[in-house]
Amino acid sequence: VDRLGLGGGSYFTSGIEQEDAAYVKSQAVESIRAACSKIRPAKLRFAQNLTGSLPMLEDTRKPQVFDPGLRILQAIDTESDTTLGTLIAWANHPETLWSKNLMLSSDFPHFVRECFETGIFDGNNKVYDGLGGTAVYLNGAIGGLMTTRPGIPIRDPFQDTVYTTASFDKIRAQGQQLAILGLQALADSARDIDTAPGVTLRAKTIEIPLANPLFRLGAALGVIQRSMTSWMKVRSEIASFAIGPVTFACIPGEIYPEIVNGGIEAPEGQDYNVPVGNNPSIREVMPGEYKFIIGLANDEVGYIIPKSEWDTEPPYLYGAKRSPYGESNSMGPETAEIVYTELVNLLKNMPY
């Protein structure tokens, strides 16, 4: 289902089909009703591996900053001691199958979920037991751009094989590698919460200027159908919620990892004379031991790029011969500052 409008039959036709959109919304509501009807007493188990996935990632744009942490939340029924569900968060575009794949696929997250639910197999031989329940995959700070292009080697965890071209075997191996890291983290260093910690939630509507000329044209033609607060200002949302020692920051797009983890630069060639400054990263502001970033949360405003790294005009950053990828799919150079400022203010005022 196209919720952005960019997949229409022509450049001047929106791909949004209202009937399909209404169906997705109704099913989302129904899934919430179904979940609420099956509420069970549970304890929560948290674990993380912050560096093990780095060999599977590439940052296609300088500066080289990643968000490689694999973070897991497991909900366990306190009466039956069985897994109700598992939340797995990692930051990478699910595009390891790459551009020649014309089939509908959730890419490597499918195998991550499958392994957490049913186990990890070497052929017909089960090597790791699964947890049961329902596994849900969340994406994080994938801007920059976080990816696993075909040339990035992914090693099969059980066979003497390294995949260096896009294939279904490669996404299977990648999903298995991530699941092994996550299951080992749960086995070795998990933290349990047995008493109800309560849930704290805050959300705020924000407005972002729509400066991208092609997006403005798309909005004027009705190809992109967005809620506007005023002339070419888009309504969006930031949010945060906390459960005990874990905090979730909900970001409405594809944020660059340097905004989340630190490492913003102001290189020569920047379009705006903006210094880096001494502002803390988002994760520095987030309280708690486990800090989940949920990207594409409730919205998709495109890439969220530090203004000091914005680059559409020559001379280009780091001596490049052309403009880097990202700006063409961003709402504009003010987006990052607005999202960052509003989210940090919200986090600082959360009653943890």
Image: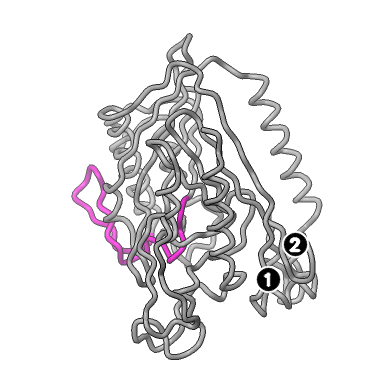
Indicate the position of residue 134 as horizontal and vertical percent values: 51, 30
Indicate the position of residue 261 as horizontal and vertical percent values: 38, 55
Quarter containing the N terminus: bottom right
Name the residue type under label 1: Leu
Could you tell whether 333 is left or right of 217 in the image? left
Q: Is residue 156 magenta?
A: yes
Indicate the position of residue 16 as horizontal and vertical percent values: 75, 60
Residue where numbered disc 2 is placed: 226
Could you tell whether 265 is left or right of 140 in the image? left
Q: Main secondary structure of the magenta part?
A: loop
| Residue reaching furthest to the left | 160
Tell me where residue 97 sits by quadrant: bottom left
Indicate the position of residue 245 as horizontal and vertical percent values: 42, 31
What is the number of the mark on residue 3? none
Tell me where residue 103 sits by quadrant: bottom right
Residue interval drawn in magenta: 140-166
Q: Residue at x 34, y 51 (%)?
A: 68
Residue 201 higher or lower than 324, as above or below: above
Q: Residue at x 42, y 21 (%)?
A: 193
Residue where numbered disc 1 is placed: 210
Could you tell whether 345 is left or right of 178 in the image? right
